Image (tube, grey):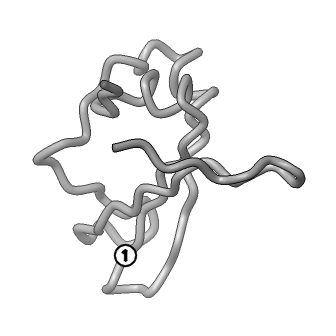
Amino acid sequence: MVTLDTFRALHEHEHQLAAYCPKCRRWAVLDLKRLIAEGRGDYCAIGRKPRCSKCGGQGQWQLRPPVMKPGIAARAYI
């Protein structure tokens, strides 16, 4: 089982985390590597909303799974 509950876990499993601000209609992809280097790797975003650095409004998270590499077939596990 893979748990994607912290910035570090997302980075280790090659996921991206983006935030959207509906107030100013802005997308931002978080730099997980930088956040981990700054000591925020254990931050858990579950149950929390991002705050827009431009307008201060509450945003929404978007979890982006790893991009499939060319030549690698998708596998389904049951």
Quarter containing the C terminus:
top left
Q: Is 58 on the left or on the right of 72, as rendered?
A: left
> 49 or 51: nearer the eye?
49
Residue 40 image offset from top left, x and y in percent: 41, 20
Residue at 61% x, 40% y: name it: 31
Q: What residue type is labelled 1?
A: Cys
Residue 17 image offset from top left, x and y in percent: 47, 50
> 51 or 78: nearer the eye?
78
Vertical placement of residue 72 versus 25, above or below: above
Q: Is mark 1 on a helix, strand or loop?
A: strand
Residue at 37% x, 64% y: name it: 52
- To which quarter of the image does residue 2 belong? top left
Q: Is 34 on the left or on the right of 13, as rendered?
A: right
Q: How crowded is mark 1: few (under 14 residues within 10 Å), some or many (20 or more)?
A: many
> 58 or 70: nearer the eye?
70
Q: Is 37 on the left or on the right of 20, as rendered?
A: right
Q: Is 33 on the left or on the right of 2, as rendered?
A: right
Q: Which residue lies furthest to the front in this view?
A: 78
Residue 11 image offset from top left, x and y in percent: 55, 30
Residue at 29% x, 58% y: name it: 51
Vertical placement of residue 65 versus 59, above or below: above
> 44 or 3: nearer the eye?
3
Q: Residue furthest right?
A: 71
Name the residue that disc number 1 marks: 21
Quarter containing the N terminus:
top left
Vertical placement of residue 62 versus 24, above or below: above
Badge count: 1
Q: Which residue lies furthest to the left in this view?
A: 47
Vertical placement of residue 35 versus 58, above or below: above
Residue 53 image offset from top left, x and y in percent: 43, 59
